[in-house]
Image (cartoon, rainbow, N blue to C red):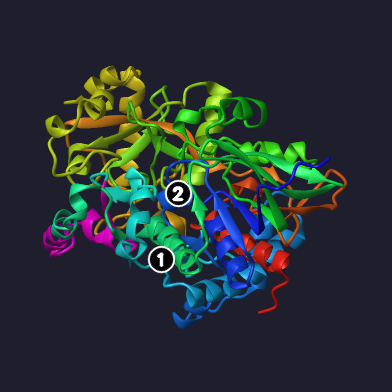
């Protein structure tokens, strides 16, 4: 005799990241009864901690900015970069439906996205865009619309906020980074807005001006609240429920009770990758072995992927991750993504032998992959060293270091990893690196940088490299000699911002079994599903862009939507 259901809905969404929230919103808008369950006490997942960018080919916003694009060009570009085992149909589904998804999103929510002149990471490849306008960033929203839910939203990553609490928009990065005229007025205004947010400031450190990933997550949650879609926190999925080869629902632990929840139209797995599951990393992704260095949130332990496998799902590219160089601050629960610092002039990266081995300004995915491979082959890249001079130290931020803040004012954890020397040889000693090798490396780099060239690794030549260079430095915005002591170094590690191998899905995000046939009632999006990008990272936002697009397609498919 079958145990009766404790609760029935049309659509059950596992996870509260952007892909899951949009799946829930689309399904609810199409008259489905929806429930979202989140295993942790905070909602938003890694999406809320991210930059919030989405990579969308041929969007209305890009066309309005004068950028002529097409799904065909985007397909050519992604197909060249993606893994050969990723089906053409999945790539087509993304590039053809990304713009309609964004049109729907901005029509049905208060979110507003803007196309940015952000070059593709491999713009020189066929179909790539050196001028950008495929990466879209959300405009800020007022978190007060969320009421009490803003307090349980995940904080932005320390790498995407100032002082660890002050949210900022993408445009504001350049105002503060290069201290543009009036920057201090802008900062003062932002700080005043934050500190005088009374009485909320007495109960929470949260910045209610939501930007980047907080804006995306907040806008989706606001729309769900208006649809009266419940989001259960601290409610992990324990297992999927199968009958006659189909997924009928799931067992969810809620308020201390195990509940059998029926999902009449389908279950959407949207609970992230296995970033924080050491056993799964060891088994599937040994190139990226360290959970502590991942920028993913603590709840990304692969539960949904393992449940899918137990239900008969096939997997794809489980060895893959969104690779990235990260700074790690002792005591923190994850690595801090290093995006901008590597492209700025007056810095280099070296392995533990004191020598450069890559183009520091390349995309974080490429740099992260090269670091991981170097570590696997030579054992001297985890950590590598990010080396910079006095002028750099007092011009730009370096991970947790702020340029106008003296060394002694930073906390002990940060000071413990910061190395300093009056000369390169003295710095090398503090780093534990051969002084002669480091001196030779810096000398060669300086001679070339003075001419604006890098014959060894071509730093500053690709369009993407220049994106984060300092335009005030010529002829190459990414190159300047390290010639002003004292000199500094910080350890930098091969990490990631999440795993991206997962359950094999079709163009409607249906999970496929080992026989390549859909498992009825089961869908997967975001890092629960194997990425259509394979092991590549074509441009800023190729994590969230497909997560939202396939979340949109999954909900439309299970509800039979035609609008």
Which residue shows up at 61% across the image and 53% down it? 13
- The Cα atoms of the two marked residues, 1 and 2, are separated by 19 Å
Vertical side of 174 occupied by 109: above or below: below
Front-most of residues 247 and 325: 247
Q: Quadrant of residue 353?
A: top left
Question: As displayed, is residue 358 above or below residue 5?
Answer: above
Residue 153 at x, y = what percent?
39, 51
The magenta span reads 165-190
| Tag 1–tag 2 contact (CB < 8 Å) | no
Residue placed most toward the observer, 519 or 381: 519
Q: Main secondary structure of the magenta part?
A: helix
> Callout 1: few (<14), some (14-19), or many (20+) C-alpha neighbours within 10 Å?
many
User: What is the quadrant of the C terminus in the image?
Assistant: bottom right
Residue 379 - label: none
Which residue is located at x 42 percent, y 68 percent? 117
Q: Residues within 10 Å of mark 2 (few under 14, many from 20)?
A: many
Give 485 or 39, whichever is nearer the viewer. Answer: 39
Asked if the stretch drawn in magenta spans residue 167, the answer is yes
Q: Residue 127: say if magenta.
A: no
Number of numbered discs visible in the structure rendering: 2
State the image quarter where residue 347 is shown: top left
Q: Which mark is residue 43?
A: 2
In the rendered image, the vertical position of residue 135 relative to residue 527, given as above or below: below
Viewer-side label of 1, 2: 2
- Residue of label 1: 138
Q: Position of residue 158 (x, y in %)?
A: 32, 43
């Amino acid at each position: 005799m079958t145990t009766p259901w404790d609760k029935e809905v049309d659509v059950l969404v596992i996870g509260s990241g952007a892909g899951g929230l949009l799946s829930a919103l689309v399904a609810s808008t199409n008259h489905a009864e929806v429930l979202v369950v989140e295993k942790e006490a905070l909602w938003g997942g890694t999406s809320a901690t991210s930059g919030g960018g989405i990579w969308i080919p041929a969007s209305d916003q890009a066309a309005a900015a004068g950028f002529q694009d097409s799904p065909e060009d985007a397909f050519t570009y992604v197909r060249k970069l993606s893994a050969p085992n990723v089906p053409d149909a999945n790539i087509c589904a993304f590039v053809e439906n990304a713009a309609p998804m964004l049109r729907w999103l901005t029509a049905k929510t208060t979110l507003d996205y803007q196309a940015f002149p952000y070059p593709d990471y491999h713009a020189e490849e066929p179909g790539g865009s050196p001028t950008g306008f495929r990466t879209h960033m959300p405009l800020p929203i007022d978190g007060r619309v969320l009421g009490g839910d803003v307090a349980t939203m995940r904080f932005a990553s320390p790498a995407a906020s100032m002082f660890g609490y002050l949210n900022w928009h993408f445009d504001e990065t350049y105002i503060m980074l290069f201290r543009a005229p009036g920057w201090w007025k802008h900062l003062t205004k932002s700080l005043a807005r934050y500190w005088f947010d009374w009485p909320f400031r007495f109960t929470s450190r949260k910045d209610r001006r939501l930007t980047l990933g907080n804006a995306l997550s907040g806008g989706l949650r606001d729309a769900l609240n208006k649809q009266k879609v419940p989001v259960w926190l601290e409610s992990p999925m324990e297992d999927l429920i199968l009958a006659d080869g189909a997924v009928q629902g799931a067992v969810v632990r809620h308020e201390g009770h195990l509940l059998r929840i029926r999902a009449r139209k389908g279950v959407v797995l949207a609970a992230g990758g296995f970033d924080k599951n050491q056993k799964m990393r060891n088994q599937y992704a040994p190139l990226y072995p360290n959970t502590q260095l991942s920028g993913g949130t603590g709840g990304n332990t692969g539960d949904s992927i393992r449940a899918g496998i137990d239900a008969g799902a096939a997997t794809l590219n489980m060895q893959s991750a969104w690779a990235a160089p990260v700074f790690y601050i002792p005591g923190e629960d994850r690595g801090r993504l290093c995006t901008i610092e590597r492209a700025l002039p007056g810095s280099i990266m070296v392995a533990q032998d004191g020598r450069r081995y890559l183009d520091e300004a390349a995309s974080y995915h490429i740099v992260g992959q090269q670091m991981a491979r170097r570590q696997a082959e030579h054992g001297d890249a985890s950590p590598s060293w990010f080396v910079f001079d006095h002028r750099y130290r007092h011009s730009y931020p370096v991970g947790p270091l702020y340029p106008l803040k003296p060394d002694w004012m930073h906390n002990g954890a940060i000071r413990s990893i910061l190395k300093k020397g009056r000369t390169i040889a003295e710095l090398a000693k503090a780093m534990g690196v051969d002084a002669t090798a480091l001196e030779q490396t810096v000398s060669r780099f300086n001679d070339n940088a003075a001419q604006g060239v890098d014959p060894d690794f071509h730093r500053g030549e690709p369009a993407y490299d220049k994106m984060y260079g300092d335009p005030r430095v010529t002829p190459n915005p990414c190159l300047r000699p390290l010639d002003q002591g004292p000199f500094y170094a910080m350890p930098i590690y091969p990490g990631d911002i999440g795993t991206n191998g997962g359950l094999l899905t079709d163009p409607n995000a249906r999970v496929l079994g080992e026989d390549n046939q859909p498992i009825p009632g089961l869908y997967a999006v975001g890092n629960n599903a194997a990425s259509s990008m394979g092991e590549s990272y074509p441009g800023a936002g190729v994590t969230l862009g497909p997560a939202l697009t396939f979340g949109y397609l999954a909900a439309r498919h299970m509800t039979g939507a035609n609008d």
